Amino acid sequence: MPAHVIDGKATAATVREEVADGVAGFVALHGRAPGLVGIQVGDDPASEIYQANKAKAAEAAGMVARRITLPDSTTQAELDALIDELNADDAVDGMLVQLPVPEQLSEPLIANRIHPDKDVDGFAPVNLGRLMRGEPGNVPCTPQGVMRMLRDAEVPLVGARAVVVGRSLIVGKPQSMLLLAEHCTVTVAHSRTVDLPALCRTADILVAAVGRPEMIRGDWVKPGAAVMDVGMNRTDDGLCGDVAFDEAVEVAGWITPVPGGVGPMTIAYLLANTLEAAHRRAGDNLKGTAA
Ligand code: NDP
């Protein structure tokens, strides 16, 4: 029997409704809407689209969204000064710098400069440390989206064998921590992993975050497994994932499509993180909020 295809668009719509309700509650409590600022350096067309989509989604959830576009020639000192200004601005609950940035700028310096409480991407060392310690903090959005899809699909997590293919700071590493926190037994694979197909075949939960079109074939998938495809690869035939969907759907128990799977969850959790950051900064008890 083919796998249950997890509908990321529908799940993301649910999360965004929850956030919108939560924003209304925040406004009632504090008399202002949570504020999100997106910073873009340069005029890369893909970044432009991402930034516009994030701002649109934030506004649709009732937040105050601001976009700042800086010239391609911006220096680290100039960007630092802007981040400092936003760190000190009480109306700003979350900020992010759209990646990639021009080569004269340093991603680690940016991640260290943004105040951890406003780092809604969850890339700051403090937030990654909190994640590892199991303390409250901003958690990277895409891995949170994957966990929500697993939970909503009622995929058994406790004791499950999870294989995460990819070890980036944005997806693979935080994903492995979140699965571990749910009591999965987690293996993180990467480009030097020996016999990746055999390892993948052991996985009850297989997360692909590689960036290689359809690298994971159907015969790498354990029958009945949950296959979560984070990959977003642009090919001549359009957007595709890291998993050969047509093959894997025949073997898996659950699978996410590309597009329409994990992708829409990322912005949804950016909004959830912003609302949560706003509550945390206001000193609210987070229990009972949508975040
Ligand atoms: P990175 O390029 O930062 O990381 C890719 C990882 O894949 C690395 O750890 C790399 O290993 C590993 N890898 C590369 N080739 C192989 C291979 N042949 N076998 C096993 N592992 C391999 O990518 P990201 O984590 O940022 O993104 C991964 C994918 O997810 C991309 O397609 C990206 O577009 C997509 N993405 C989607 C998002 C969404 O919203 N849905 C959000 C973020 C990313 P090593 O460390 O050894 O080099």
Image (cartoon, rainbow, N blue to C red):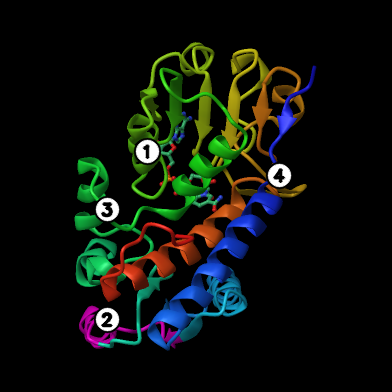
Amino acid type, label 1: Leu
Mark linked to residue 178: 1
Residue 79 magenta-highlighted: yes
- Is mark 2 in CB contact (under 8 Å) with mark 4? no
Mark number for residue 136?
Answer: 3
Q: Quadrant of residue 172?
A: top left
Q: Nearer the viewer, mark 2 or mark 4?
A: 4
User: In this orientation, which residue lies closer to the viewer: 138 or 230?
Assistant: 138
Q: Nearer the viewer, mark 3 or mark 2?
A: 3
Query: Residue at 25% across / 42% down in the picture?
Result: 134
User: What distance separates the C-alpha of mark 1 from that of mark 4?
Assistant: 21 Å
Q: Secondary structure at mark 4?
A: loop
Q: Which residue is mark 4?
A: 7
Image coordinates of residue 34 in percent, x first then y, are 43, 79
x and y, in percent, of residue 218 in the image: 67, 19
- Against 139, is 214 above or below? above
The magenta stretch spans which residues? 68-88
Q: Are marks 1 and 3 in contact (CB under 8 Å)?
A: no
Label 1 vs 3, first from the N-terminus: 3
